[in-house]
Amino acid sequence: MKRTISLLLTACLMLSCAKNVEKATAELEEQTQSIMESLQQTTDEAEAEELFTTYLSLVEQYLLNYADSEQGIAILRQTYYLFSTQQLEKIFSKMDHKTLEREEVAPVYAKFKLLKQTEEGTQFTDFSALTPEGENLSLSDLVGQTDYVLVDFWASWCGPCRRSMPTIKEFYEQYQDKLQILGVSLDNDEAQWKEAIQSLGLPWKHISDLQGWQSVPAELYGISAIPATVLINKEGIIIGRNMEVEDIKMILSE
């Protein structure tokens, strides 16, 4: 009898949890839809930033409560690249180890661990690939030559990457006595990669293993979206990831 009661209580608890997840998921979908509609209507950058922050906060709270659910796993896979390593650490700490081992979650968890190894305050992880001239170049060949090295992960097919280049060129020309840039391309096509460097007039050093999203340098740094940047100081310490241009300029002007 006691065993039967225990099983019934467990079943009721599981059913209650399932209902809670469904309700929370529906609420999140409704809130997300409202935020997306507001984002489409606004032209104010500050308002858009506030809306995005609200969205991210809602998703984070949802995942902290329901990360082990099927819905939580699906949402995590769709949004994990938007979170900081600190946020991901909190989310993963709430997940059961069996969930972390699931094939849908394991690659995301592995990427998080790579991000932890290359987050702000850690020693840079070295990598190398070929330049457009066919010569091998390592990140370690550049670190220490100037005050800072900015690693810029990009690709010729990436519209936002191409649109960011004039801004990068501007502050590179202004601070090249203190700064080196290493462009790491996630291209597959060598000709397109080289053509983009030439047509965009990018004067800094470039490398690529032409493996696209399987790029070894990108995998080492847990890159899930481009453009992405890593700023490294003369001592080889990572001092920022995906920093705003104005924040980089502030550091370089010191």
Image (tube, rainbow, N blue to C red):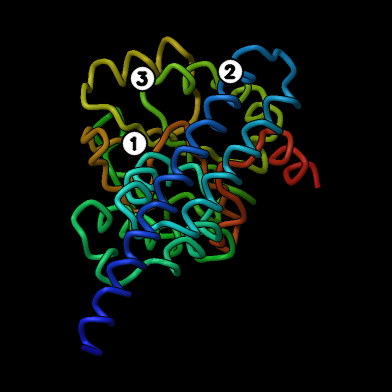
Query: Which residue is pictured at 50% across the width and 42% down the height?
Result: 82
In x, y percent, where is residue 83?
51, 48
Q: Residue 79 bears which disc, if any? A: none
> Does residue 242 appear to the left or right of 197 in the view shown?
right
> Does residue 243 appear to the left or right of 26 in the view shown?
right
- Amino acid identity at mark 3: Ser
Mark positioned earlier in the residue sequence (2 or 3): 2
Q: Residue 156 bears which disc, if any? A: 3
In front of the other: 3 or 128 = 3
In x, y percent, where is residue 211?
21, 36
In front of the other: 170 or 242 = 242
Under tag 2, what secondary structure? Answer: helix
- Amino acid identity at mark 1: Ile
Mark 2 — residue?
37
Mark 1 — residue?
207
* Mark 3 Cα shell of 10 Å, populated few (<14), some (14-19), many (≥20): many
